Image (spheres, grey):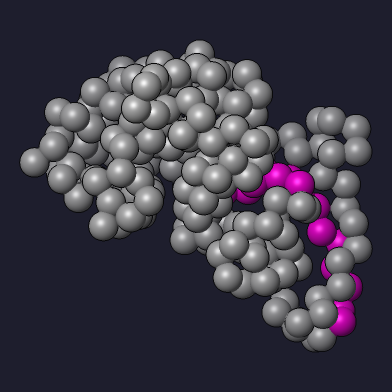
Amino acid sequence: MGLLPKVNPQRFRKFYIKQKGLGLTVTKSEELLVFFNFLQTDPDIQDIRWAAYMLATAHKETSCSFKAAAKEILPKQIPGYATAIPVKDTIGCRGPVNATYQNEYYGRGYVQLTHDRNYKAIGKAYGIGDALYINPDRAYEPAIAYFAASYGMRNGSYTGHSLSTHINGKHCNYKLARQIINGSNCDMEIAQIATRTEMLLRLCVK
């Protein structure tokens, strides 16, 4: 079991809703609890600061909704990005064996999983082989979306930067931790959310 079973989820949810500027409604907070449940049972999350930063990242990447089915806005804003490519379903996980689909690998899920190589890597790490690459919409499934967040952020799967790179026993830099997912994009905003989230988590320890 992870560290967070010591945190009262309902109390955390209540405090989170009351935080001005975070845009979390009562309805959205139900989605927050889904993500939080994964955190509570994740044996690899033993640092409350890791949990705070993961929550802050999911908050921003899902536009405050905490929905696993969050879809990236304007996926084709960069020329050549998320261009449809033909993918053959060699294992029949999506339909007839060897049927071909036009797949776009734009951002999906809690951390906006992008690029075909990442869909391949996360699917294999999750234990479903090429199924995620063949059917990228599976990244909207809560369990897979959470795995993409936890495994990818812990192992530096996306940029080479990991949670332990920026948040460890010696230091905690929530601003630089943004490099785990997306360079410096919104780094200060997410750092501020992470700082507030850490405070709330500590207040809700049973």
Asked if residue 204 can be seen in this view, the reply is: yes
Q: Residue furthest left?
A: 206
Residue 41: where, in percent of width, then height? 30, 57
Horizontal arrangement in the rendering, residue 122 relative to residue 35 (left or right): right
Q: Residue furthest front?
A: 170
Q: Is residue 37 above or below residue 9?
A: below
Horizontal arrangement in the rendering, residue 52 relative to residue 117 (left or right): left
Per the rendered image, the range of residues in magenta is 98-115
Residue 163: where, in percent of width, then height? 48, 35
The residue lying toward the viewer, choosing from 29 and 38, is: 38
Q: Is residue 133 above or below residue 185?
A: below
Q: Is 108 one of the magenta-colored residues?
A: yes
Residue 107 figure quarter:
top right
Work out which quarter of the rendered image holds the C terminus and state it: top left
Residue 141: where, in percent of width, then height? 53, 61
Q: Residue furthest bottom?
A: 96
Asked if residue 69 can be seen in this view, the reply is: no
Q: Is 109 one of the magenta-colored residues?
A: yes
Work out which quarter of the rendered image holds the N terminus and state it: bottom left
The residue depicted at 63 percent of the width and 18 percent of the height is 184
Q: Main secondary structure of the magenta part?
A: loop
Horizontal arrangement in the rendering, residue 181 relative to residue 60 (left or right): right
The residue depicted at 68 percent of the width and 57 percent of the height is 121
The residue lying toward the viewer, choosing from 186 and 67, is: 186
